[in-house]
Amino acid sequence: MVIAAVAVVSCNSNNSAKDNSTGMNHDSMPMPMKDNTMADANVKMVATTFATVDPAVSTFMKSMVADYLAVKNALANENETEAAAASGKMFDVMKGFDKSLLSADQKKVYDDIEADLKEHAEHISKNKIEHQREHFVTMSKDMYDLVKAFGAGMTLYHDHCPMAQDNKGAMWLSETKEIRNPYFGDKMMTCGSVEEMFQ
């Protein structure tokens, strides 16, 4: 119990220091994007690999990101039913994706991610929350690679929690700069920090 309490204090202390340098306002809500961007000298901006993609690919990516964020938010809210439903939607979107819309280079990147991401989406759609969170670790890495390649159609933050996975650490993508930890939920909601930003 003492170790857990110290760990929580440690993570929250680090997070508070990070918040002060990443444009958080006093209500712990994201500030307007202009202010966020100006305050992000310590947050790396990530460029998209493919500057030009087919409009239908952009639509596919927006749908994938929306479903992924729904999974992430459901896990943060301790809601395994919503996480399963959103992950099932993601799986269905991937099954219906027309890969002929991709250039040869784009297809190579997508093919390297597709099977793994489908597997994790399917597992999350059929399991309980602890197992969902285990698969969310790799799903997040796959989504990071997908967003880095094709863009997200929105601003996203790459967050990291050093205490996830028994202190091995894990990342996730978020639509807000406010830390809402999908690996711990209410136990340590604000544990983590923003590392990168996609625009």
Image (cartoon, grey):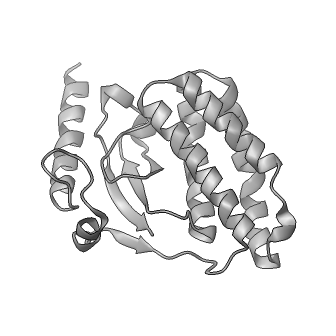
Instruction: List x then y, in percent, for residue 122.
Output: 72, 35
Residue at 64%, 52% in the rendered image? 63
Give the mark count.
0
Q: Quadrant of residue 158?
A: bottom left
Instruction: List x then y, in percent, for residue 140.
Output: 55, 49
In the image, is residue 137 above or below residue 185? below
> 180 or 130: which is nearer to us?
180
Q: Quadrant of residue 84?
A: top right
> 162 or 158: which is nearer to us?
158
Residue at 39%, 51% in the rendered image? 160
Residue at 55%, 59% in the rendered image? 144
Q: Quadrant of the N terminus?
A: top left
Q: Is residue 87 left or right of residue 164?
A: right
In the image, is residue 143 above or below residue 153? above
Q: Residue furthest left?
A: 26
Q: Is residue 144 left or right of residue 188?
A: right
Could one spot residue 119 in this view of the protein?
Answer: yes
Instruction: List x then y, in percent, for residue 109.
Output: 72, 68
> 195 or 27: which is nearer to us?
27
Could one spot residue 142 in this view of the protein?
Answer: no
In the image, is residue 3 above or below residue 169? above
Residue at 59%, 21% in the rendered image? 128
Q: Quadrant of the C terminus?
A: bottom left
Q: Residue furthest bottom?
A: 51
In the image, is residue 15 above or below residue 44? above
Instruction: List x then y, in percent, for residue 85.
Output: 64, 30
